[in-house]
Amino acid sequence: MLAGRTDLPFANDATGRFLPLVVTLMVFLAALALAAMMAFHGLVGRWNRDVAATLTIQVPVATGPESAARTKGRVEAVLKLLTETEGVARAEALALDRVAALLEPWLGSGDLVGELPLPRLIDVALEPGRVLDTKALAARLQAVAPGTQLEDHRVWLSRVLRLARAVEALTAAVLALIGLVTSATVIYATRTGLAVHAPAIELLHLIGARDAYIAGQFAGRAFGLGFKGGLIGLGLAVPTLYGLDVMAQGIGGGLLPDLRLSIPNWLAIALLPLVAALLATVTARLTVHRALARMT
Amino acid sequence: MVRFESVGLRYGQGAEVLQDLSFTLEPGSFHFLTGPSGAGKSSLLRLLYLGKLPTRGLISMFGKDVVHLKRDQLAALRRRVGVVFQDFHLLDHLSALDNVALPLRVAGVAESEIQKHVPELLAWVGLGDRLHAKPPVLSGGQKQRVAIARAVIGRPDLLLADEPTGNVDDTLGTRLLYLFEELNKLGSTVVIATHNEGLVARFRHHPRLHLEGGRMVPPPAGG
């Protein structure tokens, strides 16, 4: 199909070089935009799933004599209250070494973490779909352990989600624009082809070719050129994305959210050349049909 | 098979190049289309091969009023008409075989049939050894035979030829006329536009459609 026989003399016209070049660029950009969109989509989904149904409670350490025992007592009182609270699926105090690990990117791994009066953290999982009155819960927590703070992640999350969804929408718009530019290029190339090959097209008409036959010639040509350009664009995009992925992993340490692409994400990116080729095919076919319908 | 009633044709806003043409082509008939240069022969052929539609009057081909047909229906009618154009209209990037195969390909004939019948026909017109040659390397006579082969490969009901002897000597011209007579005997209705009076005289048993100034008139005496 890439180099099939055509009745029209496409081999020598300039669109043979121009169209693959444009599609190469478009597929490269589309791969980057699609990767960004899918990474953010995955991230938003994970955050939504993981964070929306959780609360974090900070219990300040007790000061004075027997502070450790009293802190432990406070934590246990809070845990007891939580397990008795309707809508709480699980409440678990984080071990101090885990808290230290969470703070390690900022404070380092020295003894400093051990010496600081770090508050005890309690990770609370809510029952799915359950809406909790966090203000009332915070008041009850204050009663059993003064100074206890309740962090409802949903407030923070709603802002992050808004940003993430805006990025997602933006990348979707970029993808749509890439599709439009590709289609516009194919329309231009096809119209040029119709003008350049007008005598041959007229001959095909005179020997009885239907519009669909002529459109098929242009569509086959557009598919071949689009697929060729798409494969080159994909060939450029994959190492670029892989390089970004490796760099992001290199930073690590929890500073960056996990933006890695899943295997289905990579498969979706791998389909871009085919999508570009099909878009070019359909656009070319419609363009020829519309142009021929205007001819007598 | 073909019926013209009061047909007129003009290009754009110009004067009518064909006026009030009324005639009938019976199935299996053989006609010469004659007339001086500019008389309208090529325009009449263009109407016959549906390259143009009339600006007035009625043309009925194969029982259908061509003016009211949709594009695909016109294409289907064109597949029943074979045309030998004056300047051949061969596609230079295609081999002789692929040029001749065009009408079959647009009609959706299987490739195996094409590979069987097209070389046979090219051999019949004496080009069996030039199947893969492209038009730019063929002589005028060879191109003409490729054009004729392309016109007849689909066994057309109506075969039209515009000055088919214009580029060849008298001997080859006569041979070509015999070829058209053979095709006519096989069932095709034939119309040959020519201003070669000598040739028409040699084949005077065929009736003439004679044009002058865009009108159909009786042929001159002795013609």
Image: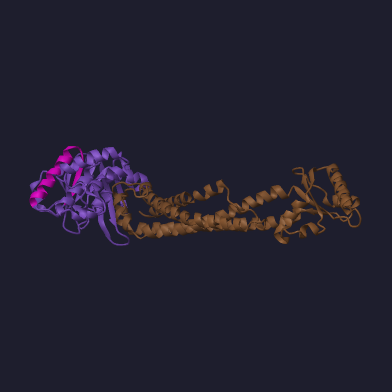
Chain colours: A brown, B purple
Picture residue at 49% right of the left edge, 57% below the top: A28
Q: Where residue A145 sits: x, y (%)?
A: 89, 52
Corner quadrant of residue A91: top right
Let me know if residue A56 appears in the view. Answer: yes
How many labels, in total? Answer: 0
A107 or A32: nearer the eye? A107
Picture residue at 38% right of the left edge, 49% below the top: A220
Image quadrant containing the N terminus of chain B: top left
Q: Which residues are magenta?
A: B170-193
B188 or A79: nearer the eye? A79
Q: Main secondary structure of the magenta part?
A: helix
Q: Where residue B96 sits: x, y (%)?
A: 22, 48
Picture residue at 83% right of the left edge, 42% below the top: A83
B32 or A158: nearer the eye? A158
Q: Which residue sits furthest front?
A: A111
Corner quadrant of residue B167: bottom left
